[in-house]
Image (cartoon, rainbow, N blue to C red):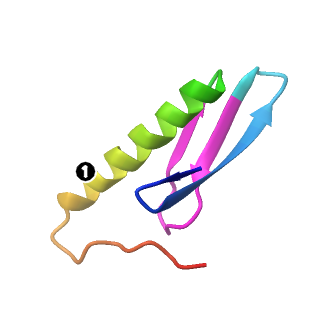
Amino acid sequence: MDYKGYIGKVEIDEEAGILYGEVINIRAVVTFEGSSVDEVQKAFRESVDDYLDFCSTLTTEYPSRMSW
């Protein structure tokens, strides 16, 4: 998945019945999960927005995405 230039990788936990993932092109650990494709996509976008909100509160230089 891609949102605002951030890439999310999703995996399936069949036992728990969830989809979960993480943003893979940043150094921070940003995760998300949902029980459907729509839910995990929404959670991914919300996680990226939360990360960006958090970064805006930092007094240091804005963390950049890693290029692949």
Image quarter of residue 52? bottom left
- 59 part of magenta stretch: no
Q: Which residue is mark 1?
A: 53
Neighbours of disc 1 within 10 Å: few (<14), some (14-19), many (20+): few
- Image quarter of residue 39: top right
Asked whether, in this view, residue 68 is left or right of residue 53, the answer is right
Answer left or right for 9 relative to 49. right
63 versus 37 height, above or below: below
Question: Could you say which is closer to the camera, residue 19 or residue 2?
Answer: 2
Numbered disc 1: secondary structure: helix
33, above or below 64, in the image = above
In magenta, the rendered stretch is: 19-33
The amino acid at mark 1 is: Asp
Residue 59 in the image: state x and y as whole percent. 15, 70
Q: Quadrant of residue 31?
A: top right
Residue at position x 25%, y 50% from top? 53
Asked if residue 28 is among those painted magenta in the image, a careful observer would answer yes
Q: x, y (%) of residue 6?
A: 48, 59
Q: Is residue 11 left or right of residue 50?
A: right
Q: Residue 60 appears at what percent x and percent y?
A: 20, 75
Q: Residue at x 64, y 28 (%)?
A: 37
Quadrant (top left/top right/bottom left/bottom right) for the C terminus: bottom right
In the rendered image, residue 65, in percent from the top left (x then y), is placed at 44, 72
Front in this rendered view, residue 9 or 61: 9
Which residue is painted at 53% across and 79% down in the image?
67
Q: In the picture shown, does residue 14 fall above or below 62?
A: above
Q: Residue at x 57, y 26 (%)?
A: 38
Horizontally, residue 43 falls left or right of residue 14, namely: left
Q: How many marks?
A: 1
